[in-house]
Amino acid sequence: ETGVTQTPRHLVMGMTNKKSLKCEQHLGHNAMYWYKQSAKKPLELMFVYSLEERVENNSVPSRFSPECPNSSHLFLHLHTLQPEDSALYLCASSQEGVFGYGYTFGSGTRLTVV
Amino acid sequence: QKEVEQNSGPLSVPEGAIASLNCTYSDRGSQSFFWYRQYSGKSPELIMSIYSNGDKEDGRFTAQLNKASQYVSLLIRDSQPSDSATYLCAVIGGGADGLTFGKGTHLIIQP
């Protein structure tokens, strides 16, 4: 495996479900990020982890809960989501901490909340 | 609120011509500037980075930065149909806030 791997690629969940998105990077980077991409909107930064510590939370609703157990793995735990949370969720990693250059993105998880 | 502005397009360019994509940003403390290409249904892919005023060339791509005008551009020479995609401008500011993206410009190269 190389680069940044995200699973699952597609996810359909009901509003009362609990699910988790997984991201793994094989680049030796020390910072990881979750972004949300909705139609006709810019990519929105949700969470930043540098050296496994959460640095930035950008006022994301509590129904999204990140977890970074080590520098290679990042999770996004989802519960009681709303239909407007349907979007493409992208994980990225970089070197040099939160001022890192050239983020590498995973393929994303296409989430549909029904 | 830090903002990155791009014309959403679509920008239509004939094959073989030069495609010119533009971006402005609001944070004067911004330090690093990037262009990403995103094909439909795919994730963004980094194609150019630039950190100082002037031009930076890489193959058919040239990035231009003017910090005084808070302006970044991307030129694609000898445009190919495979260049058809959405091009995202991204900026890193002076704070711990990661990359800020524009909405992207949809580029169409007409054969």
Image (cartoon, coloured by chain):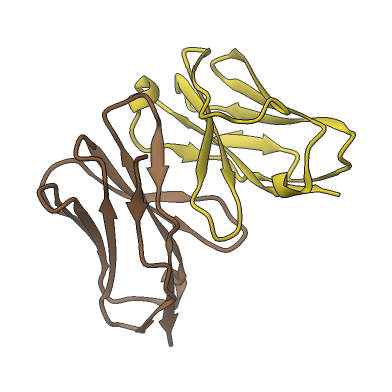
Q: In front here: B96 or A100?
A: B96
Residue B79 can be seen in this image: yes
Residue A15 vs B64, above or below: the answer is above
In the image, farthest residue toward the front: B1
State the image coordinates of residue B39 (x, y, percent, origin top left): 53, 62
Which of the 4 image quarters holds residue B88? bottom left
- Name chain B's colour: brown
Q: Is residue B2 left or right of residue A13?
A: left
Q: Going 13% across and 42% down the picture, which residue do you hit? A: B52
Q: Going 47% across and 12% down the picture, which residue do you hit? A: A51
Supply the letter of whichever chain is yellow: A
Which of the 4 image quarters holds residue B75? bottom left
In what quadrant of the picture does the N terminus of chain A appear?
Answer: top right
Q: Is residue B97 left or right of residue B40?
A: left
Q: In front here: A111 or B48?
A: A111
State the image coordinates of residue A85 (x, y, percent, origin top left): 71, 44
